[in-house]
Structures are given as structure tokens and as C-alpha cells.
Amino acid sequence: MVKRLRLISTAKRVGVVTRPYPFRPTEVPEEFRGKPIIDGEKCTGCGSCRNVCTPNAIEIEDDLEKGVRRVKIFYGRCIFCGRCSDICPEEAIKLTKEFELASKTREDLYQVIELKMVKCKICGKPFTTERSLKKTLKSVPEELHEQLYICPDCREKSTAYIESYTKRR
Amino acid sequence: MLYRKSIWVFHLNTGGCNACDIEILDVITPYHDVERLGIKLVASPRHADMILMTGPVTREVLPKAVEAVLAVPEPKVIIAVGSCACGGGIWYDAYPTIGGVESFLKIMEEEYSVKVKAIYVPGCPPKPESIIYGIALALDMVKQKIKRQVYEEK
């Protein structure tokens, strides 16, 4: 009996440990890796995050009819490793501290980014995004700029033709 | 609101790595103390209102998981905890798993004609707070924060 009374005094000294979480917000540690967000203004659609993503949560698909490249991230499969934010050359992906990701539907767990694509001058097939083309134009001398508006398949054919022509001569 | 009384939960591991299971244990400790919301872990699915599912549903465990879900009284709700249960995780296209809760729901509907509702709690493993948030979302205590975001280049 006396022992139990002692327990009351110790319980009073310790106080309440329980966090009032769902009713009041909690703090997260400084280096917490939460929901990754792609900045649509910066993304060029290069696909390096897709290559490095372990569970293939980031997918890239080309819609040839609309001429749009879609970068999709599915949070349901993401393991929050942070490799995409490490590798991104434009620093477009950042991990936030958001952890309240529970949802009732699967569709809400997606983030989609649509980027316009450039059409090939010869065959008219969209092959790369406008932003990544702008970026490569800066690092290439001006004489070769016309070559960049041609898709890799057509470029291969045209260069093969030139080579065979020069060999014949 | 789905439930009027406090809910009892059955914990079902379908081939996970036990990280999510340890986080579920954290939720019951006095620090997070989920019993103040009336939530309690029970030993049998027949006593349970909800199922906390972890793991990517391996082929070996599939018939047992189906049996456990069939034993739960209506309405059947699965809370998929962790990225394995939500979308298959890193085993989403591997041969020994069926790829998470979504294909499990399909199997339940097509072969057993049982409709099961699912709530997704992503994270690898999810924080104890985010598991509490997921259960609170099922009870309509909090609002859903995440939405499908679409960005279109102008």
C-alpha cells in the first residue's frame, strides 16, 4: 500500500510525457528527410533523377501526340533516400520536412510536371524539352546550332551520308 | 464518420522488413500513447475494426493475408503503412511480391467480391506521428493535406 502511494509522488514529479500530437503540431529534427518536391520552374526534364531513383518512384514519359514530357513522382513508392536531390543538376528537387502524407486515394500521392518538347526539323518528331535545348545551346559554338534542332536518329543518318560522300571522293 | 466508438486494430505483417512494425510499437508507448484516442492492438482479426498492413504482400503470405482480411467484420479498412504496403516499395515489380496493397485490393474484389477501403501512409519507415495522422485521417479527425499537384509549362 505504501509502495503504491510512493508511486503517485514519483508520477507527479515526472509529469506527463505524452505528446499531444494530432491536436497540436510537433517539431521534426533538422536533418529530417520528408516529401521531395520538384520545382517546376527549374526542372529541364533531363532524367538524371529517374536514373538514380532506387524504387523507380520517379518516372518520365513522352507524350508524342501533345508534344509534352511528363515527370511523375509517386510518393507511395518513394523511400525518401534523397539521391534525386543530390544528383539534380538544376537543384530543382528538394526534400521538405513534410511527413503528413497519408491520403485516402492513390491519385493524391502524385506530383506531375509537364514540359514542352521541341520538334525535329526533318521528321517532325518531338525529341527533347525546350529548356534542356536552351541549356545545351549555351555550351555549343554557333556554327553547330542548326544540328541541335535535329533529332538524334536524323542526325545519325545525315552524318552517315556526309561521311560516305567524303569517302567516295 | 466511419466509426462511432473507439477502434481496435489488427497488425498484419505481409513480408516487411520489420522497420514499420517497430514504428507501430512506438505508437503504443506512453510517449505517443495512441490509446488516448481509443485505439488498441488486438490479437485476432475477428475482434478488429481496421487492419494495419505492412510489407509488400509476398506470394507466400497472400492466402493467409486474404483469410485474415475476410475475417474482419464490415466495413473493411486497411491502413497501408510504409512504402512497401503503399506501392510495393523497391520490390514493386519483383517476382516474389504482388506489389503492395493496390493489387491486393484488386484480388479481393475480383476473386472474393469483397470491397476493401485503403488508406495510404507513405514513408520508409513512416514516423510514429505520421502513422497516428493516418489513423486520425481514417477517423476524420484531421483534414487531408496532400493533393495531386500538376505543373504545366506556359
Image (tube, coloured by chain):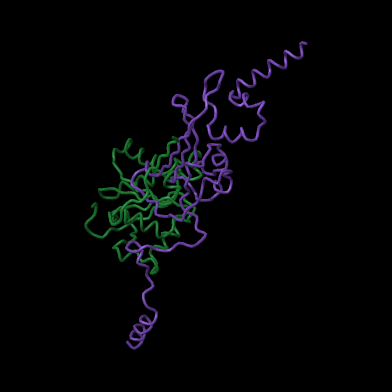
Chain colours: A purple, B green
Against B4, is A131 above or below? above
Residue lying at 33% horizontally and 40% vertically, measured from the top left: B108
Q: Is residue A49 left or right of residue B5?
A: right
Q: Nearer the viewer, residue B121 or B93?
A: B121
Quick one: which residue is furthest to the left in this view?
A: B4
In which image quadrant can residue B41 be found?
Answer: bottom left
Task: Residue A23: give x, y in percent of width and height.
Answer: 32, 63
Quick one: which residue is furthest to the bottom in this view?
A: A2
Task: Residue A146: give x, y in percent of width and height.
Answer: 62, 24
Q: Nearer the viewer, residue B72 or A21?
A: A21
Q: Nearer the viewer, residue B95 or A68?
A: A68
Q: Is residue A164 left or right of residue A133?
A: right
Task: Residue A103: give x, y in percent of width and height.
Answer: 35, 48
In which image quadrant can residue B48 be found?
Answer: bottom left
Against A59, is B68 above or below? below
Q: Is residue B148 left or right of residue A84?
A: left
Task: Residue A124: give x, y in percent of width and height.
Answer: 52, 20
In which image quadrant can residue A161 be found?
Answer: top right
Residue lying at 65% horizontally and 35% vertically, measured from the top left: A139
Q: Is residue A121 left or right of residue B47?
A: right
Which quadrant would the C terminus of chain B be assigned to in this image? top left
Residue lying at 47% horizontally and 25% vertically, measured from the top left: A64
Quick one: which residue is furthest to the top in this view?
A: A168
Number of marks in the rendered image? 0
